[in-house]
Image (cartoon, helix red, strand yellow):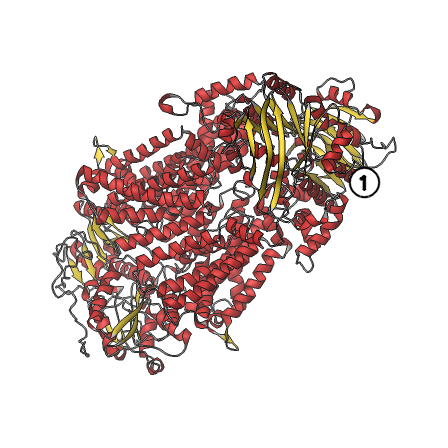
Amino acid sequence: MTTFRKLLTTTCVAAGALAAAFSMATGSASADEPKKFKIFLSLSYSGNAWQSEAANIVKALAKTPPYDKLVDLKEVISGTDPQAQIGAYESMIDAKADGIVSFPISSTALNRTVKRGCEKGVLFFMYDATVTEPCAYNVSYITAGFGENTAQALVNALNGKGKIFLSRGVPGNSVDKRHTDGAKYIFKKYPGIQIVAEYYSYWDDRTTQQETAKALAAHPDVDGIWAQAGEYGAIQALRDKGTRLVPMTGENSNGFRLALANPEFQKDGLKGVSSGSPPATSGYAFKLMMEILTKKRELKPMNIQYPLPWVPADKVKLCKGDTFEDGCNTFPEGKVPSSFVTEVFNPVFLPELSLKSALDGTPTPGKTIQPLPAEVVKAPNEPGINCQKCEPPADLYKLTKVQPTVKP
Amino acid sequence: MSANLDAMRGSAPGSNVAVAIRRVLTDGAGVVAILYVILFALYALWDRSALSVSGVTDLSNNAAPLAIAAAGESLVVISKGFDLSVSGVVSLSNVLMATYPIEGPHGALISLLICLGVGGAIGVLNGLLVAILRLQSIAATLGTMIMGQGLALVIMDAPGGTVADWVSNTLTDVIFGVIPISGLIVLAVVALWFVFRRTDACIGIFAVGADETAASLSGISVVRARFTAFVGAGLLYGLAGFMLSVQTATGNPTAGTPFLMLTFAAVALGGVSLTGGRGSLVGAVIGAATLMLLQKVLFSGGVSSFYTGIFQGFVLVLAIVFGSFISRLASTGARA
Amino acid sequence: MTSARPSAALQPPADTRRAGRIRPETVSTAAIFALTIILIFASRFVSPALGSWDQVDTIITLASFLIVVAFGQGLVILVGGLDLSIASMITLGGVLSTTWNGSIGSEWVLIPAVLIICACIGALNGVGVIWLNIPPFIMTMASGIIVASAALGYTSGTPRGAAPDVFLALMKGSVGGVSAVLIFVLVFVLLAWTLQSATAFGRRLYAVGANREAAWIAGVATWRPIMAAYALSAACAGFAGMMLVGYANGATLRMGDSYLLPSVASVVIGGSSILGGRGSFAGTVGGAMLLTTLGTVISALGMQEGWRTVIEGAIIVGALLLLREDLLARLRSAR
Amino acid sequence: MPGAASVLDVDSVSKSYGATVALQDMSIELLAGEVHALLGENGAGKSTLVKILSGVVKPNVGTMRMGGQPYEPHSIVEARRRGVATAFQELSLVPNLTVAQNLFLPRQAKGTLGLVSGAATQKQAAAILSRFRLPLSPSAVVAGLTLAERQRLEITRALACNPRVLILDEPTAALAETEWLFGLVRQATAAGAAVLYISHRLAEVRELCQRATVLRNGRSIATVSLHDATDHNIFEMMVGRSQAEEMQGRARAGGAIRPAVLEAEGLAGESLKNVSLKLSEGEILGVAGLEGQGQRALFRALVGLAPLASGSVKIDGGRVRLSGPDVALKTGRGIAFLPEERKTEGIFPALATATNIVLPVVGRIGRAGLVSERLERDAAAGSSSDVDLNPRYLDFRIGDLSGGNQQKALLARAMHTGARILLLYDPTRGVDVGTKQSIYSAIRSFADSGGAVLLYSSELPELVHLVDRCLVVYGGRIFAQLSGGDINERTLVAALTGHSSQESAA
């Protein structure tokens, strides 16, 4: 039966080949010194500006002295599938991780695995998005009231009446739900405000543009737009239809901020505020974790609130250099893509960073890690966001950034 | 294209062992099994914990939902169809489990029945559209998939809820300290397959998948065969949704979305011919397990995150090429 | 794969003089366009502003990407394959055209270069399918994953740069009051239809798709059309990617994802057989228009997203039922 | 046969699909113990009647009675239960199942717990196979069988359910010798069964059948006793006109030496052992052989479909490498191949007949690269008239044409390629008399105009009448070469079965 010998040999050969293929890949992994902290950066997916900026910030910090000597950082992108991120977490736990700083794809699906990790002494720091597992640290702006504040700002801009669009995020996503609930809580108070279209834009410029275009076909006479990330697409959609712009609120894309500051656009009717999710959260989370690991800080697992960025049109200030010096908060046209999310810096939390860090994940020459302010802001409980079975505070939707200028 | 290969199976000379081995190698399931062993060996090589009980349990818990879903898909594919509704069913049963948690073993049973009910219902709908009304399966099931996802969003508009603790804790556990329960459930499905394999209904499905006209002229009811395939598939999707909920212990209205592509990848990797009539549910199951294992192997192999995909892609292709090569070798061996 | 007709055993016997010369494709295409138009008018009830030329203009703009992609997808399906790599190819087209914009000579170098690269990758799909006997499903899925992660690595997550001016002009500009996209779509559809239905190449595609073995025996070098189909599909996807960056003036790495299923759906709803060998591009265009129109109308419905989705699915199934072959056949013989 | 009991009585049955009438006012009575022939050209309605009798389709009007009871089968299974079994023309075997499984479709033999028992199935299958003297392994997968083996299996499957009415639709289409079949049929009739026998081979029909019912355009023209009817008036009834052209032998080209256009030297490969042949200009070279003697491999090798282990092929004296049909077409004066299985290897059912004809050279007819139905029709018109295919069919989907017309179209395709060497594999398989004549004359005129033809046929008379020389293949070798007067059925039959004096020298 010569064929069998042939078969078996081929099988082995193939096996060998496969093994070889992988071991090429492993070469890098096999060489780490034991004393470094083993930190994993776990992204659910990458591919939009926000995600990669957040990741780059962490990478840059990990290369900034003294962390470059202390940290062995490994990035893992597991894709939009919770199963995959669960698998990734499990592998990290098995790989004896000291800490995992992560953007969780689901606020709930990962809990079981996170819990297992905690029991094995792994620190979990979730940035921006959150998990409801109490043993993890959530560092996020979500609880800071983006929805209600921007909604109120829009209402003020519209003097309490008009037809508006809601450009939402991803259907069935807890963050989107929190923002929208907050906004609707405000809008409900004003009978003059009429939500004529509500669509999902997946936090993406292009989708926002397409969905807004669809909505405009049905309601050309819209008076204002309340948008989550991707807001710049809404402006483009309006522009495609003509020159008329309307008051709108959105998140932190550089394009949107430039548009807000653009006198011509203002003349065409654009006003509003830029707020929402800052990638810098990841850096803050990472530094907190490092301070705990390096015993510089005592902190039990808790939900930490990251301050909500708030930049109305008149506060937009172009930056001369590559960092946020003297209160500038926007980069001039052409320096970064319009989809670039500007809130990558924080003079207080992350003075070490520069634009290159956010774009390429490279450290800023000459900078060293600065300590964080001692106190952290505790985030209020929000069921389904950062705790499972808990009571939300009575003043869940209280306004912090803006006050009503029009009576309902 | 595969006909001669099939032919060899029947008329392969040589000792029974020889025939048996050749069967394994000429049949997709066997090849993907070999691949799985190779990958697992690599995984164990790089990550000792792979052999620990918890490691194995993780693997099995991770793979179970996809494996069962792929098993369902393979039924439809063998009958020469595509079924996209899998992601709809999985999402739907997942949110139901999380919205109406029922504690205790009875609760588990009831929830299971609910999931099977949902899956079965959508399966029946697919069967109606494809088998009886003769719509193209890929288009019809696209419609039912979208409907399923919609209903899931209606029931639960954001992730949340909790699956009954008893269910999520017990079924992710191990018995006798070594055997993961999720693994047992998958084995149960496989066992069911081997029973089903020996029914006229299953032979009918294979026949219809290979040559509808001949099958109907041979007295097989094409409609019944197709219908059976879709309903069976639906039920298994329901079970997959159940197992997913068990693992994530929570509801997510979009939980099923990733299953769409993965099930097909698993099915094809498992050597089930996407043109119908050939393959085995076992292959699909192992294919799914392989896909899930691959992630771990790449992780433990330390492949740079950005390029993980490149490896996944190449392994997919390599697996297929390797498989067909082995099969050809085996069949030429038989011819000689 | 032999004839995709269900249960040939029950077909009419030989020599039936099929009523008239009207092809089934013609009828189904007419039917699907009729459905689309009905839907547009019906949408008035959803919102008075709908059903206007303005809406049609929007629909065509939004459908243009899908039409281009679906043409390629249709060719691959016609030769009995399936192209799951288009999502990544769209992204690739978008990413390359933005990142290389300005860096490699004029746009008239850039655009062909990108298209050629895409076509080559598509051809690789063909190689895998033809000579390595890899199921198209796996081959294209794998190459899709590979291209996607290559793009991810290449851009390290953030695609830079702006869209080539040509595409900005194409998506935003207008010629004599008519939007440039509209004109482009008309020209593209005409050319594409001709290629598929009125050239020797097209004929070979149909033959290969209907029965590869028979085509080979008849003396058709079957690998050529198959290869070409995959290459064209990839190129179309790449082109659509460039249109998208022209539309949104910037690329993202997931920009292609939302076009994979719709591309297949357009082809199948358009009356082509998923098994290959049958269908017309006109039908596919109808399918793309129908799906896009449906999208606009649905999004205007003032109800919860969940229910909207359910309705969308239901309408798709309903459309399929209306477009069923035997119904249309009856329609045909009624003439 | 007077006094014999009527087993099945079909009374004025009609069936129409939408606008098209397939069968009208058809009546036929089958008597116990008789073999009743059903004659008619393709499309006359024979297949429809078969489908009605075997429960595949239901008639619109008309009654059927079996032994007095009304007979309205709703399915094939029910028809079988009532004792009507059919061996279909488009063999109804499932390729990916084994011989045994196919024999028992749709119900396999059950073992414990009512589950299918492979062993039991195989055992019972083996019994059946031996009972009907069919040497096949029950575990063999059907896809691996030759066409002839499949045909036998199909027949066996029908016989296996001991039918009272046995319907055989073109049972000898792929069978070169008929003893096996006729033996079984006679057994069945002896046991009191009635057999409805459909064939285009009148010789067979006369040998086996007592009465014949003739169909034309969906109507039953007459039922005649074959003793009293001459071939002539049977043809007349079938085609409605007196048979113009009788088969006359071809004026054989004598010793005139013409240049060899195709030479094969020591071809060996799968089921081919050292085959050499020489085909000259204007010659029709016949190939005869029982099924599975290597003729298929020979043809496929000569057109580059099957790989060669060794041997060389010369065209016009120049050695060539044929890597595939496309290359074969373009090499030298070109080789075109007419394949064995019309449905799976020949036609593209959904495409127009014209497209089917011009396909291999469609690139040529384009105007500025564009082709249209009109261009195709005009291009195809010429060759379609060569095979006397009614030009109005050119616009139809070829799938809607009768088998005969499809075959004509395929021959037209081969000729249209412009190739001067034709490899025709059983070109008249399962086509009616009229079509046969057209095909014969087309082949002849092709040869007369200087073309060269290699022709395999499963019907010896055909070879006798058509060819100049005839090779007999046996066991993958060329066993004998006959020419001139030696080409007659007697010598051929002898050679086929391996009894012959002269050894091959070609």
In the foreground, D63 or D377: D63
Lateral position of residue D58 relative to residue A260, left or right: right
Judged from the image, the secondary structure of the residue bearing numbered disc 1 is: helix
Image quarter of residue B154 = bottom left
Please indicate, yes or no, whether residue B157 appears anywhere in the rendered image: yes
In the foreground, D384 or A308: D384
Q: Which residue, given by chain and number where applicable, does mark 1 sit on? A: D445
Neighbour tally class for label 1: few under 14, some 14-19, many 20 plus, Cα within 10 Å: some
Q: Mark 1 belongs to which subunit?
A: D
In the foreground, A367 or C79: C79
Q: Position of residue B280 (x, y in %)?
A: 42, 34
Q: Amino acid at mark 1?
A: Ser
Q: Position of residue C41 (x, y in %)?
A: 44, 66
Please indicate, yes or no, whether residue A105 appears anywhere in the rendered image: no
What residue sits 44% from the left and 43% below the top? B132
* Image: B81 above or below D85: below
Q: Position of residue B246 (x, y in %)?
A: 24, 43
In the foreground, D290 or C243: D290
* Image: D454 above or below D331: above
Lateral position of residue D472 relative to residue A232, left or right: right
Quadrant of image for the C terminus of chain D: top right
Q: Position of residue A172 (x, y in %)?
A: 28, 56
